[in-house]
Image (cartoon, grey):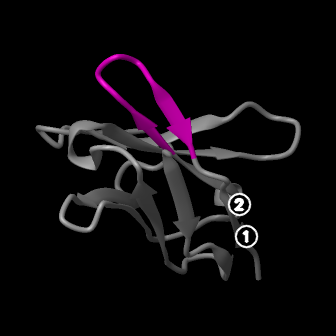
Amino acid sequence: QVQLVESGGGLVQPGGSLRLSCAAFGFRFSSYDMAWYRQTPGNEREFVAEIGGPGGTLNYADSTQGRFTISRDNSKNTLYLQMDSLKPDDTAVYYCRARGAWGDTHWGQGTQVTVSS
């Protein structure tokens, strides 16, 4: 059974940092493209960053480029998102997404990130 479990969210002051983790279970993690998305109430889910499976190709949203770093540890079946220089606009529920070569897509349950003084 495919499962993605996010952790690491919380409350942080503007300018601070957080590191999100996404533990993956039930599929061949190293072969899947992995990504982070975020969503605020009343809005669609927004792309944050992506890292390819086999080659590890990176892609970032314009709003997160230079502040966020996506990475993966295939030996631990875990995806990470290091978030630095956080802004109030980064407040959202952050979701982990896995996508296989055949287009099968899986989502985690999300973790809340709140940036506020």
Point 67% across, 78% down: residue: 10
Q: Mark 1 points at which residue?
A: 114
Find residue 41 and report its horizontal and vertical position in percent.
Answer: 86, 45
- Element on which disc 2 rests: loop
Q: Earlier in the sequence, mark 1 or mark 2?
A: 2
Pointer 1 with pointer 2, Cβ within 8 A: yes
Point 34% across, 28% down: residue: 100
Residue type indicated by callout 1: Thr
Residue count near mark 2 (Cα–Cα under 10 Å), binned few <14, some 14–19, many ≥20: some
Residue count near mark 1 (Cα–Cα under 10 Å), binned few <14, some 14–19, many ≥20: many
Residue 117: which quarter of the image? bottom right
Q: Is residue 101 magenta?
A: yes
Q: Which of 48 and 27 is in front in this view?
A: 27
Q: Mark on residue 91?
A: 2
Point 49% across, 45% down: residue: 2
Q: In this view, does 111 lie to the left or right of 96?
A: right
Residues shaded magenta: 97-107
- Element on which disc 1 rests: strand
Point 88% across, 37% down: residue: 42
Find residue 92 and report its horizontal and vertical position in percent.
Answer: 71, 55
Q: Answer above or below: position of 66 versus 104.
A: below
Residue type indicated by callout 2: Thr
Q: Is residue 33 left or right of residue 112?
A: left
Q: Does the magenta stretch include residue 7?
A: no
What is the count of numbered marks? 2
